[in-house]
Amino acid sequence: MPPADALAPERTGGGGSDPVLEVRGVTVHFGGVSALTDVTLSVDRGSVTGLIGPNGAGKTTLFNVISGLQVPNSGVVVFEGRDLARVRPHRRARLGIARTFQRLELFGSLTAEDNVRVGLESSIRWWQWHRLRASFPWARDEAGDGARATGSRVVGLADRLLAGVGLAGHESEQSSAMPTGSARMVELARALAMQPKLVLLDEPGSGLDEHESEALGSLLQRLAADGMAVLLVEHDMELVMRVCDRVHVLDFGHIIASGTPDEVRADPRVQKAYLGASAGSAPAAGGDV
Amino acid sequence: MPPHDLLPDGNRRGRRWAKLASLIVLITLLAVVPPAMNSYDQYLITLTLVYAITTLGLNVLIGWTGQLSLAHAGVFGLGAYLSTILIQHGWGFVPSLLVAGLGSAIVGGLVVFPALRFSGFTLAVASLAFASVIVQLFDNGGSVTGGGGGLAVPVFQFSGLSQTMSTYYVTLISTVLCFVVAHRMRHLRFGRVAFSIRDTEIAAVVSGIRVVRYKVFVFAFAAFLGAIGGALYAQLETFIFPVMFSTNTLVLMLVMLFLGGASSLYGPIFGAIFAVVMVELLQSFGSYQDLLYGLLLMLVIGVLPGGMASLPERLRTSHLLGRAVRGVASRFGRGRQDEATAASPVPPTATGSSLVDDPGDGVESGVA
């Protein structure tokens, strides 16, 4: 593990940009296959960063490395100036890295509201007195205003978060019974409930109709405007090109291009990776790639 | 505004009080009626409660948190042996009960170590091995455990009550306490976290949950409940052998768990009632007893895959039984509906369907 001060110069030398997350030289092998090779990228505070690439390019593997589910063979992940090598996944979540999954990982037996509550409550210590007091009905029903406020504040927050992703009125639906589009939004609300500084979204747009994906786009831009950093893996090129400030393109585990959406779109290597030999139109053509 | 807020607050509170009142009536009946029963029925009802506590532990482990750990019969035995040995050394029954519970929580909590590395069948096998080690200790414990010959249990007795009734009252109080604690746990954060670990552990981790800590607690708590059940069981049977805690007992526990309804809070009670009552009823069939028991088991599981606790839900949604119930309900509903639609602006479908539904759902569909 490199010492902390070795990481410092690069961080301060950013020249105006304010990276929340830096991934440096990350390499991951699965047996003989290398899923990621020397991947370096950074995500700035208050920006939406896109990560695109064909299926199997290693996008989800990179997400797993950042959230701590996959240990890289080499390379470092730095979050707010702190090397995360020894930080376990649930600690990373509490430090402010939230994520969603490409294959939905909802708490299916819980309602939408309770899914979000799990995210909200993960930072409350269970031995805290007011939480404990909420476990006793008589304390809650009587003058136990503190306990009551805590309980209903969590519910109120959860409902507000659900309303924020367009699911007002669906709080008490069981999440496993929800259509994919709504389920993805529950997952997003659960991630946002942790008040993350960085949120990793793995194809949040799949399963959404045109209208919903437009709403998602403006939600992401609003989050970024509030200072959150968003790293977005998405196949819907229209969405990526519209909301991202920067885009990184991953192909067979290598970053082959980085830049603004327009720069990336114009890059011949990107066109080759996406469209094979018949490079003509840009990936902005959209749809599933 | 969330639709469930549209339900009049008084109505919801009223339902809660109705529930609480019926529970108090039930518990009062359980306290008052058994002294009038014959001692065999007293034994059976105590056994049912003992099974309910024990299976509740297994339910928290398997049903809520999804940890397929099969050490429960061993832990059940540990509670029985520990409390018996403590009583033999002059301890009072209640302290020995608690210490046996806590001691077993520590030992049973050790199963969490394989559980942190494995899940599913691998955990099942590892925990089964753990249980058989415990039972081997009973078998080879020399004079401490009495070996294969077992131990006579010094039976505790309140003055003025029979032995069975003394055990019964301690069991009843323990059952109420255990279920109250479990009820609070289920409906508060612990329940949500347990279910989220069961549903998808990986999402629980990235939601900031210390899965390891929760698992340690769940294994210890399950072992505590199992051991309390075991200690009470020893009092009830007055003599314990290692064979009483073999895999057969585990199978019985699993039957009670899944028959009653894994993941439901009260499932273990239904499962325990079924197990005890069926064995008694089928005794008159002599050698066909086991065969009938097996067939009945398959029938119940076939009709109610979610266990007996899912019966009300099943009635609402099933094709055969439910259609009959819904038919009757909607006939009554339609009669009232005509009067209702004349006066109120509520769409007719809302009142018609809500009769058989949970009131909460009915209100919701009325809004949509």
Image: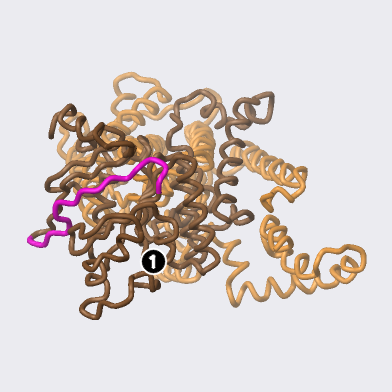
Chain colours: A brown, B orange
Q: Which residue is mark 1?
A: A237
Badge 1 element: helix
Q: Is residue B155 left or right of residue B185?
A: left
**Picture coordinates of residue A117, whole percent (x, y):** 51, 43
Q: Residue furthest top?
A: B90
In the depicted structure, whether residue B272 falls above or below residue B100? below
Q: Main secondary structure of the magenta part?
A: strand
**Picture coordinates of residue B34, whole percent (x, y):** 59, 41
| Rendered residue at 59%/43% (across/down) | B37
Q: Check disc 1: other Cα within 10 Å, few if <14, some if 14-19, many if 20+.
A: some
**Picture coordinates of residue B125, whole percent (x, y):** 21, 53
Q: Is residue A69 left or right of residue B98?
A: left
Question: For residue B205: magenta?
Answer: no
Chain bearing tag 1 is A
**What quarter of the picture does the C terminus of chain A occupy?**
bottom left
Q: Is residue B326 at least partly visible in the picture?
A: yes
In the depicted structure, whether residue B325 falls above or below residue B217? below
**What quarter of the picture does the N terminus of chain A occupy?**
top left
In this orientation, which residue lies closer to the viewer: B246 or B11? B11
**Picture coordinates of residue A75, whole percent (x, y):** 15, 44
Residue type of the residue flagged with mark 1: Met
In this orientation, which residue lies closer to the viewer: B338 or A92? A92
Magenta-tinted stretch: A32-47
* Residue B328 sits in quarter: bottom right
In the depicted structure, whether residue B61 falls above or below residue A95? below
| Rendered residue at 47%/27% (across/down) | B157
